[in-house]
């Protein structure tokens, strides 16, 4: 008996059968690519760029489906990422992902959302006392342990030659909001805040005399972190995601109010809170991975004893997806803005 498969036995011509099979294969492939990227985020200024992308349908424009899940803490979001319940996290800091990676988590930093923007909080009558890192000597300082602003502050103390055990008193808190409350109550003289406490600090009548940028200019804050599995199996989707975020960065550069509108619409912030977060000049919205800044943050973490394990930064930081996204936009819609970002990429990521 002839063991060849005969389409005519099922009432199909050969041409029609082949077409049907190709269509079926195409549908299977379409089903595979139709799975959305699973994205975790925290509410705040660190999520403004993806919110602009949602508000302006940039994810649809670049052809990537997204499924966003909000988390109330970086640790919860990174635990979900570590369990591969997410493909990427967009606002879980820099230090926390590096800490997870040092303990074996298969994370890859592929981009960013925010640089700088963490305030120093004091009562208004004490604002004049704080002009540089040296003014913290002898003070009682509240800080949110292992948050980016905490590492930047401790790194600045290290660079200034301070002994944190002798030259000042550091009180650690688990949550940034607890630092703010400690400043209000007088439990600490000065507090190290995060971007999400800017609005609340101002509403509480506190002053913000210094910023993390004053200690470490252009330091990276919230990085876009993917799993190794997502980078390996979903690279085209991740590049499309980064293209959408780059379009959002361009939109914000041309129309800063777009960030306010997006956070009011997408994050349900009051207009005043959105303005406090989005239009604060110390907060720099940027999708660039900033390899050099991440390397410096890891160096600080090692110096101050936060990093116990080792991290192969060559594996943990992958700038090629961002660069691919940027080059695609340069080809598809030439604009001086992309040339500016190309130069920034070289300055922040390439070693001579």
Image (spheres, rainbow, N blue to C red):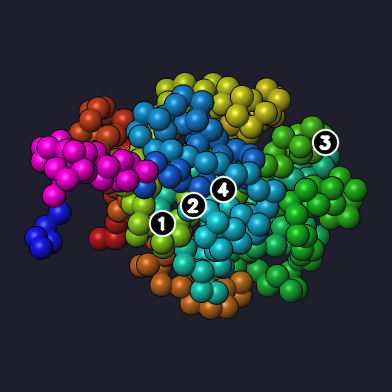
Q: Quadrant of residue 273?
A: top right
Does 27 lie within the magenta span?
yes
What residue would you read off at disc 2? 88
Mark 4: few, some, or many residues within 10 Å (few <14, many ≥20)? many
Mark 2: few, some, or many residues within 10 Å (few <14, many ≥20)? many
Which mark, residue 151?
none
Q: Secondary structure at mark 2?
A: strand
The part of the chain drawn in magenta is: 6-31
What residue would you read off at disc 1? 230
- Residue occupying image coordinates x 71% and y 42%: 197
Give the side of residue 265 with respect to residue 237, left or right: right
Q: Secondary structure at mark 4?
A: strand
User: Of the residues tagged 4 and 3, which is closer to the observer?
Assistant: 4
Out of 334 and 26, give the one closest to the viewer: 26
Give the side of residue 292 with respect to residue 298, left or right: left
What residue would you read off at disc 3? 204
Q: Is residue 275 visible?
A: no
- Residue occupying image coordinates x 24% and y 34%: 330
């Amino acid at each position: 008996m002839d063991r060849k498969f005969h389409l005519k036995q099922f009432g199909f011509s050969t041409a029609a059968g082949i077409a049907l099979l190709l269509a079926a294969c195409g549908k299977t492939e379409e089903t595979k690519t139709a799975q959305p990227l699973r994205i975790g985020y925290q509410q705040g200024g660190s999520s403004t760029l993806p919110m602009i992308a949602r508000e302006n349908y940039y994810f649809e424009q670049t052809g990537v489906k997204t499924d966003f899940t909000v988390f109330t803490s970086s640790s919860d979001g990174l635990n979900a990422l570590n369990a591969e319940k997410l493909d990427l996290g967009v606002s879980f800091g820099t230090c926390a992902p590096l800490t997870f990676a040092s303990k074996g988590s298969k994370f890859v930093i592929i981009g960013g959302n925010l640089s700088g923007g963490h305030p120093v909080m004091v009562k208004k009558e004490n604002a004049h006392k704080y002009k540089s890192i040296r003014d913290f000597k002898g003070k009682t300082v509240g800080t949110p342990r292992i948050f980016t602003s905490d590492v930047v502050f401790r790194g600045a103390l290290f660079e200034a030659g301070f002994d944190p055990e002798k030259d000042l008193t550091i009180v650690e808190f688990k949550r940034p909001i607890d630092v703010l409350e400690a400043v209000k109550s007088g439990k600490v003289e000065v507090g190290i805040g995060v971007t999400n406490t800017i609005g609340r600090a101002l509403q509480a009548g506190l002053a913000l005399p210094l910023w993390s940028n004053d200690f470490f200019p252009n330091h990276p804050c919230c990085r876009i972190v993917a799993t190794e599995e997502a980078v390996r199996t979903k690279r085209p989707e991740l590049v499309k995601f980064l293209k959408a975020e780059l379009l959002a960065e361009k939109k914000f550069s041309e129309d800063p109010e777009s960030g306010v509108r997006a956070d009011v619409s997408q994050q349900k912030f009051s207009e005043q809170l959105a303005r406090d977060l989005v239009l604060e000049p110390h907060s720099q919205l940027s999708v660039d991975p900033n390899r050099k800044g991440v390397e410096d943050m890891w160096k600080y973490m090692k110096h101050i004893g936060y990093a116990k394990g080792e991290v192969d930064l060559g594996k943990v930081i992958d700038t090629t997806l961002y660069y691919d996204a940027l080059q695609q936009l340069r080809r598809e819609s030439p604009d001086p803005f992309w040339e500016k970002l190309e130069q920034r990429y070289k300055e922040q990521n390439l070693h001579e």
